[in-house]
Amino acid sequence: MNDRQAQNPLHGITLEMMLNQLVADYGWIELGGMINIKCFNHEPSIKSSLKFLRKTPWARTRVEELYINTRRDLEKLEKLLMPLM
C-alpha cells in the first residue's frame, strides 16, 4: 500500500458505508439539517441518496467531510473516556 492511501481516512470506506453510518449516528432529520439536500429531507432512502451523491460531486464532498469529522470526533471522545473505564 502506498503512503497516500495509508493516510487517506476514506480508504476502504464506500459511499454506502459512510451514508449508513451517518444515518445511524444522526438520523435522516438531523442529517438533512446538516446537509440540506432534497434526498435527505423528502422521502429519504439510502438508494435515492446514493444515486444523487454519485452524480453530484459537491454533495458527495460534504458527506465525506461530515463522515471524516464525525469519526475524528468519536476517536477524540474515546481517548478522553478511556482513563475513566
Image: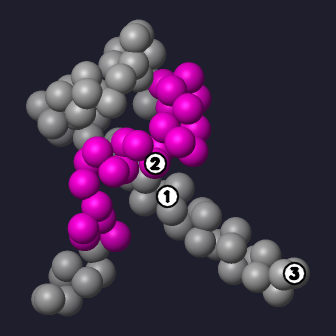
Badge 1 amino acid: Asn
Considering only vertical position in the picture, is 65 above or below 7?
above
Is residue 45 at all visible to an observer of this figure?
Answer: yes
Residue bearing mark 3: 84
Residue bearing mark 1: 69
What secondary structure prevails in the magenta region? helix
C-alpha span from label 2 to label 1: 13 Å
Q: Is residue 30 magenta?
A: yes
Badge 3 amino acid: Leu
| Sequence-first disc among 2 and 1 | 2
C-alpha span from label 2 to label 3: 26 Å
| Sequence-first disc among 2 and 3 | 2
Task: Give residue 56's mark.
Answer: none
Is residue 58 at all visible to an observer of this figure?
Answer: no
Please provide the residue range marked out in magenta: 9-33
| Sequence-first disc among 3 and 1 | 1
Residue bearing mark 2: 21
Q: Do the CB atoms of the residues marked 3 and 1 lie less than 8 Å apart? A: no
Considering only vertical position in the picture, is 34 above or below 84?
above
Badge 2 amino acid: Gln
Q: Is residue 39 left or right of residue 25?
A: left
Between 12 and 3, the one nearer to me in the picture = 12
- Where the C terminus falls, by quadrant? bottom right
Question: Residue 3's spot in the image, x, y percent?
Answer: 19, 89
**Which marked residue is nearer to the observer: mark 2 or mark 1?**
2
